[in-house]
Image: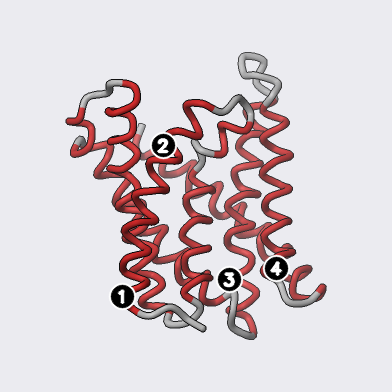
Amino acid sequence: MRPGDRTVALASVVGGLLLGFLDFCWIKWLPFPIAELGNSTATWAVAAFLFGYWVRSGWLRAALGATVLLVVAVPSYYLAAALLQGDELAVLWAPTSLVWMFFGVLAGVVFGTAGTWARGTGWRQIVGVALPAAVFFEEAARFAGKATDPGYSSGAWWNVAIDLALGVLIVVLTGRSHRQRALAVAVAIPLAAAILVTFALAGGALS
C-alpha cells in the first residue's frame, strides 16, 4: 500500500530533519572507518533512493519528496553542529550550505525517481536498482585512490570494503531475481565510472 500525499510530505520534512541531525551525530561520535559513512555523499543519495522506494509509485511525488528530504537535511546538519559543538548558526545560510542544498535538489530528483523505478519493470527497474549501488561503487573507487596515498590512513581500505559491500547489499535487497541483480551490478559499474568522472570535473571546476 503506497503512502498518501500528506504522509509523503510529512515524512520528507521529518526525515530530512532526522537525516541531517543524526548524520552529524554519526560523524561526531562513531569511530573511523564507520564514521565515514556519515560523511558520505553516497549515503545521502541512497537515503533519497530509499525514500522513493518507500513511496512506491508516482515518480514526481517521489522526486519532490526526496528533494525536500535532502534540502531540509542540510540546515538540520549545520543546526546540529551549532547545538552540539558550538559552530556558528550563520553557516545555515552560508554559500556552502546553499551549494549543498542545490546538490540535494539534483540528487533528490535522480535518486527519488530511481527508488520508484526499482519497483517497476524492464530497463527502468534495472537502472533504478543500479543507481544506489553505483554511488557506493564510485565512493569505493575514491577511497581506493586515497588508500594508495602514503599520507592517508590505511583504514581507507576498510571504507572501500564497506562501500562495496553496501552496494552489493542494496542490489541483493531490491533486485527481484538473480538475473536482475546481475544486470544491475553490470549497469552499476559504468554508472559508477561516469559519476567518478563527474565528481572529478566538478572538483576541478570548483577549485
Q: Nearer the viewer, mark 3 or mark 2?
A: 3
- Point out residue 65 in the picture as x, y percentages from the top left corner: 36, 67
* Earlier sequence position, callout 3 versus callout 2: 3
Residue tagged 2: 204
Whether label 3 touches label 2, CB < 8 Å: no
- Point out residue 173 in the picture as x, y percentages from the top left corner: 70, 65
Q: Amino acid at mark 2?
A: Gly
C-alpha separation, residue under disc 3 versus residue under disc 2 = 29 Å
C-alpha separation, residue under disc 4 versus residue under disc 1 = 32 Å
Indicate the secondary structure of the residue bearing disc 3: helix
Whether label 3 touches label 4, CB < 8 Å: no
Residue tagged 4: 184
Indicate the secondary structure of the residue bearing disc 2: helix
* Earlier sequence position, callout 3 versus callout 4: 3
Residue tagged 3: 128
* Earlier sequence position, callout 2 versus callout 1: 1
Residue tagged 1: 6
* Earlier sequence position, callout 4 versus callout 1: 1
* Earlier sequence position, callout 3 versus callout 1: 1
Q: Quadrant of residue 188?
A: bottom right
Q: Amino acid at mark 3?
A: Gly
